[in-house]
Image (cartoon, rainbow, N blue to C red):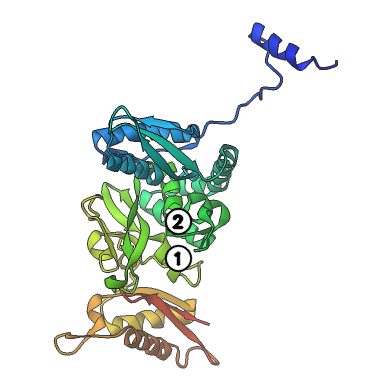
Amino acid sequence: APSQPEVHAATTASNHPGCRDQRTPLHPAPSLESMVKTACAFERERLSEAACRAYDELRKGMFGYQERIEVLGATGEELQDAYEALRYGAPEALWLDGFSRRRSAISALNWDVFPVYRISKDETARLLQEMADRSEPLLAALRALPSDEQRVQAAHNALILNCDYSDSDDPAEATAAGALVNGKALCLGISLAFKYLMDRLDIPCIVVRGNANGSGKMEDAGPHAWNLVQVKGGWSHVDVTYDLSGSSDKRRPFLTYLGLSDAQIASTHTWDTGKYPAATRSFDCYRRKGRFVCSWDELAGLFDLTLARDRFCAFQLDERLARTGATGERVLSAEELRRKIFDLAGASLTGVMAGKTQLSVTGSNALHVYHVAVA
């Protein structure tokens, strides 16, 4: 049958609730709010009462792509705190790109807020759906694991395997979509992607903003982002970006920065300790795998067991092995440590592997985690 004129169809739908306007989709696109999973309320809960109200207004307005949002009873600092809580607490909020503000004439604590949206609402919905579609097979595999600690490690490893660190002019690299959809992201994008996965596993997770330098020279530290994750009631640090940077073979990722306490990560990272929960729990990844080495003889024995067989060995040295002298007064340089490891590895292969072999030693000198591979 021929279609009815547009005006008639609209009138019919309006006058007769049982008739659907054929221009209306049978399954309307989900709202942006419905595509967000808020599993960790830390960012909002740390705010003052006035900032909480501002947060709620900003969330409602920015998730609705409003051009102007009225916020009442907040200082400029509380308004900024509310925005940062929304930006870092909801890794899905990839369309946000700051805001401008104007004081209302009625009160110094009343504001007209004008959000800046990086992309259109339709593009946002498309990206969020793509993030969900791409992540679901991984999330299904993570949910099948028996413990949250294993889920955290598997998510950490999956991001390392499927993402590269990138610092170009692409603003998407600072979003979760950069890591989960494009496979390229900055430390912030990687941290938001990790939180995106943890939120969907109902594992409390926070994006930490601070400074870091992997060499341990904190006078040269620069801005950095990583995560705090809560497992079995205790918080631990997870820095996927730093482990990604050390993983020359992504199939064998570094676990250097997986599940560290405050004391362990403090040699390379600094942050406002009063702003975030204390991390007292350590995964002790290498110790639990029997790869924490307390003597050079023990390392030689580990090489004898693994290098010829696996052509690879990952381990962590006791910090005391980085010192020499009768009382351990001299700290070995990074080059001296690597040379000693290289020589021990070479000795374990002498007469065992036929032909010439090439060895590579990579690792974190600050936390004494190393990978030795046979080419």
Residue labelled with disc 1: 244
Relative depth, front residue between 32 and 108: 108
Residue 191 in the image, given as x and y percentages of width and height: 41, 54
Residue labelled with disc 2: 190
Q: Quadrant of residue 307?
A: bottom left
Residue 27 in the image, given as x and y percentages of width and height: 62, 26
Q: Quadrant of residue 26?
A: top right
Q: How many marks?
A: 2
Residue at 75%, 11% in the rendered image = 8
Does residue 164 appear left or right of residue 330 in this picture? right
Q: Earlier in the sequence, mark 1 or mark 2?
A: 2
Kind of element beneath mark 2: helix
Seen from this angle, which residue lies furthest front?
105
Relative depth, front residue between 65 and 194: 65
Relative depth, front residue between 116 and 234: 116
Residue at 40%, 83% in the rendered image = 304
Packing grade of label 2 (10 A; few <14, some 14-19, many >=20) is many
Q: Quadrant of the N terminus?
A: top right
Kind of element beneath mark 1: helix
Q: Is residue 106 above or below residue 55?
A: above
Amino acid type at image mark 1: Leu
Amino acid type at image mark 2: Ile
